[in-house]
Amino acid sequence: IAELDINPLLASSKGVLALDARIRVSTAGASKLAIKPYPKELEETLNLPDGRRLLLRPIRAEDEPALIRGFERLNPDEIRLRFHHPMKVLQHNLAARLTQIDYDRDMALVLADQGDDGELHAVVRLTADPDRRQAEFAIIVGHWIAGMGLGMLLMKRLIRYARQQGIGQLYGSVLADNNDMLGLCQHLGFVQEHSADDPGVRVVRLDLQSSASA
């Protein structure tokens, strides 16, 4: 309801009487957030070059312990490149926020072992604004599983998902010395620009609705 006009409104000791009323309803604005069920249709079994079979699937709230264990396996430089600052511990509040997501607005795809208690080896995620004009992405692939093209694969899956959701643009902040990630983004068609807030950061952007990459 954008506007409510009651005129005339008569009031007395016996009560209130509205003789005329006018209501104006506004057009729909930003989409409302909703709780979606776990999107099982996004699950995919991957056969790695080394013979392993891993499951690519959306993250779940119960993945928090595995996410923390995976963080503990990362080396300091991997943590710095992902979070842009050193971190020794992945605190519960951050781990919960990263695993308890709203599937309507956010998506995080994890590369995990088969089974409910499988370890997490990589995560790629996006967070969209309410109007889906743009979404910010982030990615981490553990060093113990690197060198098999998984970063490229995960980014392509995320780009495909973002397009299917009607998101207009995908963007991310990448440290200037993260040459591997900057090269990957360039290959996928992202445009790179200097961050206005931090000279050590590059912002990469991909127009999803006009680009045919990935």
Image (cartoon, rainbow, N blue to C red):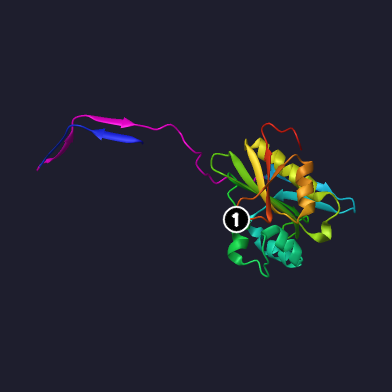
Residue 22 within the magenta-colored segment of the rendering: yes
Toward the viewer: 117 or 143? 143
Q: Is residue 207 visible?
A: yes
In-image side of 136 versus 78 (left or right): left
Q: Position of residue 146 (x, y in %)?
A: 83, 56
Q: Position of residue 170 (x, y in %)?
A: 66, 42
| Image quadrant containing the N terminus | top left
Res 25 → quadrant: top left
Q: Kindly identify the residue that appears in the image at 64 percent across and 39 percent down.
A: 169
Q: Position of residue 113 (x, y in %)?
A: 78, 56
Q: Is residue 38 visible?
A: no
| Mark 1: secondary structure | loop
| Image quadrant containing the C terminus | top right
Residue found at the far bottom of this picture: 88
Q: Kindly identify the residue that appears in the image at 60 percent across and 62 percent down.
A: 94
Residue 30 within the magenta-colored segment of the rendering: yes
**Mark 1 is on which residue type?**
Gln
Q: Is residue 151 above or below residue 32?
A: below
Q: Position of residue 49 (x, y in %)?
A: 89, 50
Per the picture, the main secondary structure of the magenta-coloured stretch is loop
Residue at label 1?
Answer: 100
Tell me the crowding category of disc 1: few under 14, some 14 to 19, or many 20 or more residues within 10 angstroms, Cα based: some
Toward the viewer: 117 or 198? 198
Q: Kindly identify the residue that appears in the image at 66 percent across and 69 percent down.
A: 89
Residue span colored magenta: 13-39
Q: Kindly identify the residue that appears in the image at 81 percent across and 50 percent down.
A: 150
Residue found at the far left of this picture: 13
Q: Is residue 90 above or below residue 152?
A: below
